[in-house]
Image (cartoon, rainbow, N blue to C red):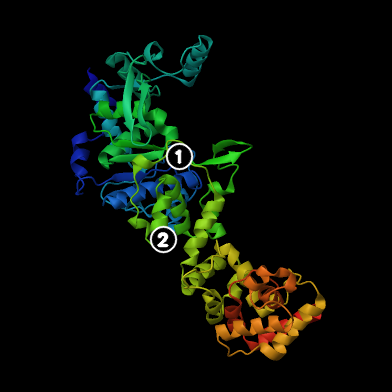
Amino acid sequence: MDYKDLANLIFPDAKPISYYEEKYAKRNLKEGAIVTRFAPSPTGFVHLGSLYQVAIAKKLAKQTDGVLFLRIEDTDQKREVENGVTGIIKSLEDFGLTPDEGMIDEVNEKGDYGPYKQSLRKDIYQAYAKHLLEQGKAYPCFATTEELEEMREKQEKAKIRPGYYGVWAKYRNLSVEEAAEKIKNGEEYIVRLKSPGNEEKRIKHHDLIKGNVDFPENDQDIVIIKADGLPTYHFAHAVDDHLMQTTHVIRGDEWLSSIPIHLQLFQMLEFKAPKYAHIAPIMKEDDGGKRKLSKRKDPEAAVSYYTDEGIPKEAVIEYLLNIANSNFESWRKANPNASLDDFELQISKMSVSGALFDIVKILDISKTVISKYTAEQIYDEAMKWAKVYDKELEQMLENKEYALKVFGIERGNAKPRKDISKWSDVKDNIIYMYDDKFDGIDEKYDYQKVQDKETIEKIVKLYIEKYYNENDDKQTWFDKIKDLAEEIGYAREVKEWKKEPEKWPGHVGDVSTVLRVALTRRSNTPDMYEIMQVLGKDSIKARFEKALKAL
């Protein structure tokens, strides 16, 4: 018997690798186009760190006219959760990161390089494992759980490096005949790579983010095919990235230490290795130190958090680009209205150490993003969110015509309002504009600087009886508030009062605050003239009367 006979015994039905090399034709892409992938396991929610990787991968693929594909790495089927693939796809769609090819639901896919689910590629992996067996680069290993445990204990006692390598690789040097005999006798086995590495030698590698790194060579005889016939992650990734013609692997830096194994696999399979970019994790401050954003401790680690809170996808992606490249912030200042597509992401400008997570920054970006929306856009997004998360808000928005007037206040100006940072803010932001809700608001009237009840009553009554006219334009309306301020002995202009504050008890701003609070129970709102135009005469008068009664 020779290696080919043994390979045939193990994988009798496997096709020659030439079949797959011909089947997956060279991609017809321009020079420099990046082909990259998001390759999650369907084992739970999508982490913000994963979204960060996809946002970078998608950006690099798009700006080079390349391809981002979604490959599902489901060879560890014990950890798989129900509808895990659907959850991943929906999370990517929610953030505008739909891949160009790959899985589109639990069973369907698009693209010419599938199947894009590793559990459906078993025949492919076995063909390449057979190819390695035929060359004597892999072998069947019959080590039992007990044997491996005994080996580990001996290594621990001797205080030497653990693993299956060198003299510890008990079944590495079995003859072909001995191996065949064991297989024919029905002994269980796995297939291992016969590593040519030497731990005392080092490999040099250039990572696109980390720069030049070096590691000891891999000398471990890693498992490539498990007892169930499915591949390990390491082997599957090498075969898939070759056949799918991945040019760049963009992944978390927890995989950096796997580089010696992965490069060795590409070398032994005689494939060209892709370029690797290992992204530093998103960090969080904790008790004066830093730690990785955690699935277990941090609700904001799950991308569903941003959907639940109603933070627009553009804001989240903009934040991720912001931490990806240090020059993004200056680019955004210079191009406040430009599309994110116009920003050129550069891997070389990515940080080697992890960026610090900042929810305040995300919400600040979100306020700016929402401030550029039209009233119609805000209505559509708020309603879509409300239908899932807030039935009261949904009911408030049923009168679309009125809701559009409310959302139109101070919108489209040179300096638009920035009071909404997420759709979950909307109800609290607009509830005072709805009379039926306003009556039920349990908030006190806080007139700020003016606390004297007589003065408050005088301001409100004078305004209703003498100064209010629903047909006034904005300038006339404001001039009348100045007249009212002057009539009660307050400064007409704030700057006058600042020059001689002892001359007046207050200024026109204090008077308008009294009217604002009486009207909305809030001292900080968008433009009061526009609010009054939306509320209308009857509502305004009823609210002022209510405020007077409350005195």
Res 216 → quadrant: top left
Q: Is residue 366 visible?
A: yes
Quadrant containing the N terminus in the rendered view: top left
Position in image of residue 387 (x %, y %):
55, 68
- Residue named by callout 2: 336
Count residues near mark 2 (Cα–Cα under 10 Å), then give few for <14, some for 14-19, many for 20+: few
Is 74 above or below relative to 328? above
Position in image of residue 439 (x %, y %):
72, 77
The residue lying toward the viewer, choosing from 259 and 45, is 259
Q: Is residue 97 visible?
A: no
Position in image of residue 482 (x %, y %):
65, 81
Count residues near mark 1 (Cα–Cα under 10 Å), then give few for <14, some for 14-19, many for 20+: few
Q: Secondary structure at mark 1?
A: loop
Res 528 → quadrant: bottom right
- Residue named by callout 1: 77
The residue lying toward the viewer, choosing from 278 and 487, is 487
Position in image of residue 498 (x %, y %):
66, 68
Number of on-image labels: 2
Q: CA distance from mark 2 to mark 1?
A: 46 Å
Is 459 above or below relative to 277? below
User: What is the three-letter code of the residue carrying label 2?
Assistant: Pro
Q: Secondary structure at mark 2?
A: loop
